[in-house]
Structures are given as C-alpha cells and as structure tokens.
Amino acid sequence: MAEQREIEFVFEPQSEGGYYVYAPELPGLHTQGEDLDDATENAREALELYIEGLLEEGRPIDSGVVRRKLPISV
C-alpha cells in the first residue's frame, strides 16, 4: 500500500482577480485559477503532473524542504 501524505498549497488572491497557487514543499509547482474552486482543481492537476514527472525521472518525491512555524508578537 502506498504511503499517503498531504501537500500544503498557498492560494494568494490577485489584484486583477483569481488566485496564484503554489506548493512551498515542491519547488516549481505553481498554477492559478479564476476563483478558489478553479484554482483548487488546477492545483490537484498540477500536483498529479508534478509527481508523475518526478517518478518518471526516478527522483524522490521528498524535496528536503523543512518548514517550521515561529511565533511573533502582535
């Protein structure tokens, strides 16, 4: 059985409308959409293609990116 994990995506609203979407853990994976639903569907498709490309090239899915949250004073 394949290991299942989640990839975090960031959806940034654009001043001209729509969303710019990227996955910080996967350099080079980015897309966009006219609204949040469109952007989410495009992100799913981009993720599938990204993983497919890695597997075809024999590269690991884990990019080694480390993410940590740090507190801020507000």
Image: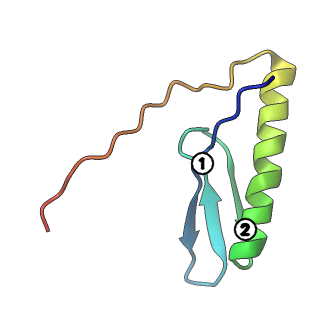
Callout 1, which amino acid? Ala
Indicate the quadrant where residue 10 lies.
Answer: bottom right
Circle number at residue 23: 1
46 left or right, relative to 12? right
Toward the left, the furthest residue is 73
| Residue behind mark 2 | 39
Residue at figure coordinates x 12%, y 62% from the top left:
73
Task: Give the CA distance from mark 1 to mark 2.
Answer: 12 Å
- Report crowding for label 1: few under 14, some 14 to 19, many 20 or more residues within 10 A (C-alpha): some
* Residue 4: x %, y % from top left: 70, 34
> What residue occupies the far bottom of the structure in this picture?
16
Image height check: is 59 above or below 68?
A: above
- Nearer to me, 1 or 64: 1
Give residue 32's position: percent from left, percent from top: 71, 65
Q: What's the amino acid at mark 2?
A: Ala
Secondary-structure class at tag 2: helix
The outermost residue toward the front is 1
Q: Is residue 32 above or below residue 4?
A: below
5 sits left or right of 53 in the view: left
Q: Point out the image quarter for the N terminus.
A: top right
- Residue at horizontal 42%, vertical 31%? 66
Residue drawn at x 64%, y 72% is 19
Secondary element type, mark 1: loop
Q: Using residue 66 as the reference point, say whether residue 9 is left or right of it.
A: right
Nearest to N terminus: mark 1 or mark 2? 1
Judge left or right: residue 53 versus residue 29: right
Relative depth, front residue between 30 and 6:
6
Q: Quadrant of residue 12?
A: bottom right
Q: Residue at x 79, y 61 (%)?
A: 42
Crowding at dot 2, Cα within 10 Å, few <14 / some 14-19 / many 20+, comes out as some
- Which one is nearer the viewer's eye here, 66 or 18? 66
